Image (cartoon, coloured by chain):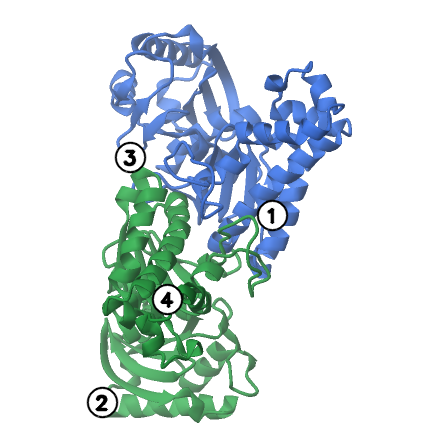
Chain colours: A green, B blue
Amino acid sequence: MKKDHVIAIDLGGTNIRVALVKGQRIVDKIQIPTRVYKKKEQLLEGIMGAVKVLLKNAKRPKSKILGIGIGTAGLVDSQKGIIHHLVNISGWKNVHIKKIFEKALNLPTYVDNDVNVMALAEGVFGAGKGASNILCITVGTGVGAGIIIDKQLYRGSSLSAGEIGHMPLGIGGIKCNCGGTGCMETFVGNDYMVNRTRKLLKGHRRSLILKLACNKPLEITPKLLTKAASLGDKVAIEAWKQTGRYLGIALAGAVNLLNPEVIIIGGGMAGAGKFLFEPVKKTIQKRAMSVPARAVRVVKAKLGNDAGLIGAAELVREEQ
Amino acid sequence: MKKDHVIAIDLGGTNIRVALVKGQRIVDKIQIPTRVYKKKEQLLEGIMGAVKVLLKNAKRPKSKILGIGIGTAGLVDSQKGIIHHLVNISGWKNVHIKKIFEKALNLPTYVDNDVNVMALAEGVFGAGKGASNILCITVGTGVGAGIIIDKQLYRGSSLSAGEIGHMPLGIGGIKCNCGGTGCMETFVGNDYMVNRTRKLLKGHRRSLILKLACNKPLEITPKLLTKAASLGDKVAIEAWKQTGRYLGIALAGAVNLLNPEVIIIGGGMAGAGKFLFEPVKKTIQKRAMSVPARAVRVVKAKLGNDAGLIGAAELVREEQ
C-alpha cells in the first residue's frame, strides 16, 4: 500500500492542530486550544487521541501513513527530536518527543521549529514554489527565518541557522533579548514598532490611531496601525514606512550575502500588506547590489495558518 | 589512464599563475607578472604557451588531465564561463573563456571568481578541511566571501552570493562604491581603516606609525599598522581593535543567520594576526547568539597564495 499520507502536528502557543495531510491537502484536522492542557502528560495524551480519531474518521489504515511531522514554537533539537521547552505546559523539559511518538505509534517522527516548517511549506507548495534558494521570514513579536538552499532546508552547523532577527543593524543600539545589541529585531519587532509609533504620535494628537485605540496608547498594535493606515492616517503610514525601511535594510544585507531567488514574508506583520511591502521592496532595490537585487522577488506568505501543518508533513517527506 | 591532474590558472591583478595540480599538490607552476600583457590576445596566448610548457616539462600526456580550472579577480559568469572584465587588459570584454579554452585545448574548462576559488581550496584542503558549512572571507581593499554549504560551493540564484562586504552595518552611514550605504566594507576595508587611523593619530603625534611612515600619513597601510602594533604602538593596536570589532559585529550577523562551523579569514588584513583576530573573536562571542557563537571557529586562511591554484583545480573536480 502506498504510504502517501502524513500525520502533521502544529504545536503552537495558542492552538494545537493535528491533521492528516496528503501532499499539500489537509484531509482532516482537529484543533484544540493549547490552554486546555496544563501538563505534559495531558498534552501528549490529547495529541495521541486526536491522531487515533483522525485515522478512524478518515478510514485510513496505518499502513498508508508515512510518518509523523511536528512543528513547534518551542525550542527544538531537530536532530535528536527533542522539544526543550513549551511555554505554559508544566513538566515539559527536554521532552524526547520523537522517541515517545515512535514508541507509541510505531511511525517515524520528525520535529522542527515553526519557522523552518513554514519555510518548507511555503518553499514547496506556497509562495516559493519552484524556487531553489529561498529566505522565508516571519515578522511579529520576534523575527526569524527559515533558509532553503538548493530546495533543501538549511539548518546550520548546530541547527540554529536562520536567526535573521539578530543580525546587527548598527555598531551600537538597543540591548536585545538575545544578549546582543542593535539587532534587526529591535528595529522591526512588534513592540519596538509600537513604541516608536507612540513617539511619532506626540505631535499628532488627532491621529486616527488614538481614536482606534480608544485613546489608550497601550492598546496600539501593528494590526491597529494597519487599519489606521488603510483609512489614510499619515502617522500610521509613516510608522509602516519606517518599519519597512528598517526591514528592507536588513534584508538588503541578506540579499547581498545569500542572493536568494525569493524572500517570503509571513507572520503577523505581513498582514500590513503594501504598507510594509512597498518600503521593504524599495529599500532592497536601493541598498542591495544591483545583480542580487534584480534577482530577488519579495512576496507575501501564501499558506497562512495551514503552513504549520503542510510544512510539518513535508518534514517527513524530506527525510525519505 | 587515470585523469588525476588539473591545469589550474590564477588570473590575478598582479600575477598570472598557471600550474599543473594533483590533489592539493602543485606539481609545477609558471608565474608571469600580469603587466607583461597589454592585450587580450597576448594574454590568452601567454597562458596557452604556459600550459604547453607545463605539460611537456612534467611529461604528463593530455590524457591524464581532467580539465582546466580558472580563478580570477575579474567579474565572472561562472555558469556560462565568461570573464566580463579584466583590469588593465585592453580588448577584454565579455570573454567567453570557457569556449576559447575548450576549443583550443579540448579539455572541460571551469571559471569562477577568486573568493569562491579560495573558499573551495580552504574548505577542501585548508583551514576548513572536514567542515560542512564554511564562510570564507577575504579582507583587504574590499571584503568578499565564498560560502560552502554542505561541502558544496553556494553561488546563489544569480551567481552573486557572498557579498558580505555589502551587508549594512547601520541605518545610515558612508556611501559605498556598490551604491549602498553603511556597508560593512566602509567600516573594515583597507582605505577606511587607514582613514580612521589618520584621525586617531591627531592626538598622538609621537606614535610609531608616523615614524614608520616617514611622517607621511599617506604612506600608512594596514601592513604598516601591523608592524607598529607588533612594536607595541598603542594607536596601531587601537586601530586594529576598532577594525576587528566592526568586522566582528558584521560576522556576528552572519553567524546568527548562517550558523557556520568555521569562518576562515584571508586577504591582506589577515596578516595582522592576533591584532585583528582577537577583537573579531571577542566581538562574535559577545554579539552573536550563544548557540551559533559556541559552534563557530574563527581561523586564519592556511594556503596563502597557493589557494588560487588549488581552488581553481578543485573547481574542475567539483564538476565531476
Q: Amino acid at mark 4?
A: His
Of all chains, the one bearing label 1 is: B
Location of residue B165 in the rendering, given as x and y in whole percent from the top left corner: 46, 38
Measure the alpha-carbon separation of dots 1 and 3. 31 Å
How much space separates mark 2 and mark 1, taking CA atoms? 52 Å
Q: Chain of mark 4?
A: A
- Of B2 and B125, nearer the camera is B125
The residue type indicated by label 2 comes to Lys
Residue mark closest to the camera, 4 vs 3: 4
Relative height, residue B115 to residue B97 (above, below): below
Q: Tell whether label 1 touches label 2 (CB within 8 Å).
A: no
Figure quadrant of residue B232: top right
Point out residue B116 in the picture as x, y percentages from the top left corner.
43, 35
Residue B41: image location, x then y, percent:
30, 9
Location of mark 1 (residue): B297
Disc 1 secondary structure class: strand
* Residue A155 sits above or below residue B245 on the image: below
Question: Which residue is disc 2 drawn over?
Answer: A59
Q: Residues within 10 Å of mark 1 (few under 14, many from 20)?
A: some
Give the residue type that dot 1 points to. Arg
Q: Of circles 3 and 2, which is in front?
A: 3
Give whichever of discs 4 and 2 has the lower sequence position.
2
**Element at label 3:** loop
Packing grade of label 4 (10 A; few <14, some 14-19, many >=20) is some
Residue at the spot 48% in from the left edge and 51% down from the top edge: A169
Label number found at residue A204: 4
Q: Nearer the viewer, mark 2 or mark 1?
A: 1
| Tag 3 residue | B79
On screen, residue B188 versus residue B117, left or right, reads: right
